């Protein structure tokens, strides 16, 4: 039921209650996790749209231990682009709901979440409306899987050990299967593979190159291509470079996917193909690319470069 209802959420989370012109540049999940201090599960005690929330900590899964009740009134990654009528961002949480929160500190050192739209994940029965990539792209994930994988991601990002065996067993189980389509009958597999691919990215795991190339080549599902391209960031090799360049040069590849491929190339410092990259830049699209969505969404100013801009930045840094 939830899998069907939230299939569209993976493409775009649009909160219709955010119909105002206070906007911000939404951070990616890696930055949210890296700059948070605690990963907790909590229940909403109260919410005031203009002041914040009070939560009851149910358990701390990783990071600084927290317990009891906590007032959260600020943000630690809020990059405002515009403010409507002098009013700041609003809080939209329902009393009694349970969430997983990434708690950090605001400029005053008080407990905070990343932004009004990220740094938390709603629990719905035995599933979680989860972010592994960006709040624009979400997936429905079983509670047990979410806790295992996100705890590992948090601990890894803070230089701490995690249950490597459990994570690798999960990844191998799902990546050995053929890439799933975004269809009603295969959404469970699609979400599981999304989690597996994003774990390879966040945890910089080796040993999955052949599987990643299969997902990278899935022209029927650009979300599989995005996650695979991200995961390939730590697989520096001539063969990997060729695969990423192939996608960037292909007219059939979406611009969003091309930019992700360029970012993965950038992490590999491919100095040997600098001249090739300059040639690609000359032919690259300068059309704006990004998450799309409702222009009334407060995350509308989230920055995402054109293919030409991404290539220019890569070349400049080689």
Image (cartoon, grey):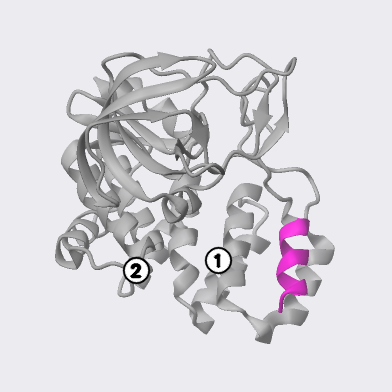
Q: Within the image, what quadrant is residue 315 found in?
A: bottom right
Residues at marks 1 and 2 touching, judged by CB atoms closer than 8 Å: no
The answer to whether residue 260 is left or right of residue 13 is right
Q: Badge 1 is on which residue?
A: 264
- The residue positioned 35% from the left and 70% from the top of the image is 210
Q: Which mark is residue 151?
A: none
The answer to whether residue 123 is left or right of residue 271 is left
309 part of magenta stretch = yes
- The residue positioned 49% from the left and 79% from the top of the image is 236
Q: Earlier in the sequence, mark 1 or mark 2?
A: 2
Residue 254 visible in this rendered orientation of the protein: no
> Disc 1 to disc 2, how far (Cα)?
22 Å
Which percent across, then down, holds residue 267? 56, 72
- The residue positioned 52% from the left and 22% from the top of the image is 14
Q: Badge 2 is on which residue?
A: 159
The answer to whether residue 65 is left or right of residue 182 is left
Name the image quarter holding the N terminus.
top left
Query: Which contiguous range is marked in magenta?
Result: 308-318
Q: Could you say which is closer to the camera, residue 112 or residue 144?
A: 112
SS at mark 1 in the image = helix
Q: Could you say which is closer to the camera, residue 132 or residue 6?
A: 132
Which percent across, then down, holds residue 148? 20, 50
Q: Could you say which is closer to the camera, residue 119 or residue 278?
A: 119
- The residue positioned 68% from the left and 44% from the top of the image is 303
Total tally of numbered discs in the picture: 2
């Amino acid at each position: 039921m939830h899998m069907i209802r939230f299939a569209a959420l993976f493409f775009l989370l649009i909160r219709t209650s955010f119909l105002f012109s206070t906007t911000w540049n939404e951070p990616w999940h890696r930055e949210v996790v890296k700059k948070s201090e605690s990963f907790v599960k909590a229940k909403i005690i109260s919410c005031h749209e203009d002041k914040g929330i009070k939560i009851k900590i149910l358990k701390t899964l990783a990071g600084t231990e927290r317990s009891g009740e906590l007032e959260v009134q600020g943000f630690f990654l809020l990059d405002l682009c515009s403010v409507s009528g002098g009013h700041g961002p609003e809080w939209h949480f329902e009393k009694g709901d349970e969430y997983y929160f990434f708690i950090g500190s605001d400029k005053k050192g008080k407990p905070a979440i990343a932004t009004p739209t990220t740094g938390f994940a709603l629990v719905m029965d035995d599933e979680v409306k989860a972010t592994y990539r960006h709040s624009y792209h979400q997936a429905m994930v079983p509670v047990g899987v979410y806790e295992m994988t996100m705890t590992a991601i948090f601990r890894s990002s803070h230089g701490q050990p995690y249950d490597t065996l459990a994570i690798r067993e999960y990844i191998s189980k799902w990546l050995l299967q053929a890439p799933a389509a975004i269809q009603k009958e295969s959404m469970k597999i699609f979400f599981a593979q999304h989690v597996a691919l994003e774990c390879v990215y966040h945890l910089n795991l080796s040993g999955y190159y052949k599987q990643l190339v299969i997902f990278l080549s899935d022209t029927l599902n650009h979300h599989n291509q995005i996650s695979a391209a991200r995961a390939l960031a730590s697989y520096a090799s001539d063969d990997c470079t060729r695969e990423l360049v192939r996608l960037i040069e292909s007219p059939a590849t979406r611009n969003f996917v091309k930019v992700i491929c360029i970012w993965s190339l950038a992490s590999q410092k491919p100095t040997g193909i600098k001249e090739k990259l300059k040639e690609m830049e000359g032919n690259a699209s300068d059309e704006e690319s990004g998450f799309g969505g409702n222009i009334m969404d407060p995350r509308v100013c989230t920055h995402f470069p054109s293919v030409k801009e991404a290539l220019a930045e890569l070349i400049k840094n080689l």
